[in-house]
């Protein structure tokens, strides 16, 4: 059986992963917002370090009521827009549809499940440097790995098939335990997303400053210690994983994380799921993430200044 | 006996306190740098909330070798320039000269004493909002209290006389235990100096953001807890002092602390004495000031960017 895909949010993430699937011959229906007219007419271009491609004819929509019911819905919205899912999803769902939230942070699936108690939900963590470089145009600069994990899939075979569809499309995809995978991704996101905003800079310039690298390392250790308390008896992340993340970032192309781009374009920041929820979960497990709370307060100060003035 | 004063560093602090003494009839010799020619010709103007005054004829110098030996030397340099004192001070010193470091931070007196083992040294903490508003022109916007304390005065009577000279000059001056007074001043300086730089803002805008006020409060508590461990058995600061500082700042005129002005004008930041030394002393007492270390790393990142690029 061939799965029918929908992509909600065709930006740097949805455009890339949905584009890869479509480019490998899968049926993919894309929901677009500002780029709808352009993509309908000109298609979707992906300039990728793994090889450029151009989807000349794209199944493009600007409202989900026009879209068919799909087997898999890839959600690649900014998590600040997840409140829209309550309206956006229903037209796409049949009784076995799997919704995969390719977003960073904690608590995303639980929040969605509240609105759709019977829905099968999974999560996806994208280890990728990509960006929207123009109308219907995505740049892919580094990485690309996608870690998938079930939250409430009734049939695990669907997720396995999604994973294998991605692999066939040239994406390095794996299935992991979701909660651990989300925390592991946060070991990168929490220090780099916030600090590039507060310091108004890119990853490489942070990595060139030894005192800053030490601070980033301390913040990573806070994430890992919080994770290990929350996951006690279920999963554990070794502290050495922080060193791996530092080393990976040092070798990475100079990069503005998505939150830095949101800041640059004066969009709301994804602080809720990336900062507030982890802080809350760690606190409930008895651990106060002092540095992360500080970073979160600084982000909220910055955001208030540009969003409400 | 009437004391003869010298002021090293005639800026927002030295210009104000030295100016008040001179205006009350004391003999005050001012060392100036960039404003020397202007002040020699036009004198020194202080626009003060307590009443403006203009010293038309000022004992102005541009090198200490031209200055007379003095009984009291008020040092109001940026602490980043304290290495200059080894050269600047000797011409001003007789065997009983008292040097008062009107500067923020910890370890200033100890460092100076290393270069001048027999010198009588005191410290001064200025609770004032003032700024250089032009050539030979100081603005005094709020506060003005000066807390003095002995570090190695051989004759305590001199410091008492200095204190009374200030009081006669219209300055609210007190004598305190120096180490405690320095830590108490840091309860304000550590959060506000650093955070106005990192957030690129003024005190009032920090105080208008509830999450930021909470963070500033946490940072103040770190200072107080560090102080109380370092001062164990000698002094103690109640945690409620943090609330007093928040309340004072809320009532204060919107203000750019000196470190924010240093940042604005791309001058070196006084991180060594205001951040590194307190962090080190607290660490030696067994307390890790996590948030303060984070703020210090952010400041050093910012400073490196503008000083060395």
Image (spheres, coloured by chain):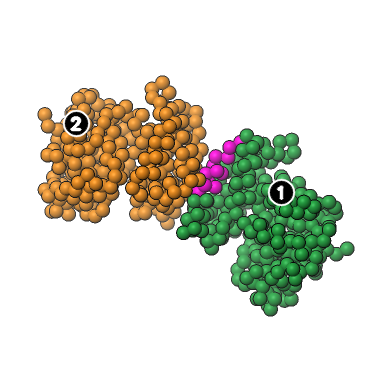
Chain colours: A green, B orange
Residue range (magenta): A287-299
Quadrant that contains the C terminus of chain B: bottom left
Q: Is residue A26 above or below residue B54?
A: below
Q: Are marks 1 and 2 on the same chain?
A: no
Q: Is residue B274 left or right of residue A42?
A: left
Residue picked out by circle 2:
B164
Q: Which element carries disc 2, helix, strand or loop?
A: helix
User: What numbered label is drawn on residue A110?
Assistant: 1
Q: Is residue A297 magenta?
A: yes
Q: Is residue B218 left or right of residue A71?
A: left
Give the percent coordinates (x, y) of residue A161.
83, 58
Calculate the distance from the C-alpha at mark 1 to the C-alpha at mark 2.
68 Å
Main SS, magenta region, reads: helix
> How many numbered circles are shown?
2
Q: Is residue B254 above or below residue B161?
A: below
- C-beta proximity under 8 Å, tags 1 and 2: no
Q: Chain of mark 1?
A: A
Give the percent coordinates (x, y) of residue B149.
28, 29
State the residue at coordinates (83%, 51%): A154
User: What numbered label is drawn on residue B101?
Assistant: none
Q: Which element carries disc 1, helix, strand or loop?
A: helix
Comparing labels 1 and 2, the label whose residue is closer to the camera: 1
Residue found farthest to the bottom: A41
Q: Residues within 10 Å of mark 1 (few under 14, many from 20)?
A: some
Q: Is residue B308 magenta?
A: no
Q: Is there any visible trace of residue A53 in the rendered image?
A: no
Q: Is residue B8 above or below residue A163?
A: above
């Amino acid at each position: 059986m061939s799965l029918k895909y929908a992509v909600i949010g065709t930006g740097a993430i949805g455009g890339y992963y949905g584009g890869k699937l479509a480019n490998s011959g899968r049926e993919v229906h894309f929901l677009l917002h500002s780029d709808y007219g352009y993509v309908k007419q000109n298609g979707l271009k992906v300039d990728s370090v793994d090889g450029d491609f151009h989807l000349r004819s794209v199944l493009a929509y600007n409202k989900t009521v026009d879209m068919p019911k799909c087997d898999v819905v890839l959600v690649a919205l900014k998590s600040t827009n997840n409140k829209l899912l309550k309206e956006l999803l229903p037209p796409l769902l049949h009784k076995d549809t799997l919704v995969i939230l390719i977003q960073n942070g904690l608590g995303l699936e639980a929040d969605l499940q509240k609105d759709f108690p019977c829905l099968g939900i999974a999560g996806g963590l994208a280890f990728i440097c990509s960006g929207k470089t123009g109308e219907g145009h995505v740049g892919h600069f580094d990485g690309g790995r996608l870690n998938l994990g079930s939250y409430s899939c009734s049939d695990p075979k669907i997720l396995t098939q999604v994973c294998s569809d991605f692999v066939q499309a040239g994406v390095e995809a794996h299935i992991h335990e979701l909660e651990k995978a989300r925390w592991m991704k946060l070991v990168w996101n929490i220090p780099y997303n916030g600090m590039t905003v507060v310091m108004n800079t890119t990853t490489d310039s942070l990595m060139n400053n030894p005192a800053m690298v030490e601070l980033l390392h301390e913040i990573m250790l806070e994430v890992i210690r919080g994770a290990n308390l929350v996951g006690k008896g279920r999963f554990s992340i070794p502290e050495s994983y922080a060193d791996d993340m530092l080393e990976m970032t040092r070798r990475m192309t100079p990069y503005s994380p998505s939150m830095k781009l949101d800041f640059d374009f004066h969009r709301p920041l994804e602080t809720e799921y990336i900062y507030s929820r982890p802080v809350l979960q760690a606190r409930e497990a008895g651990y106060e993430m002092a540095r992360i709370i500080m970073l979160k307060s600084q982000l909220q100060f910055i955001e208030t200044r540009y969003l409400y003035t």
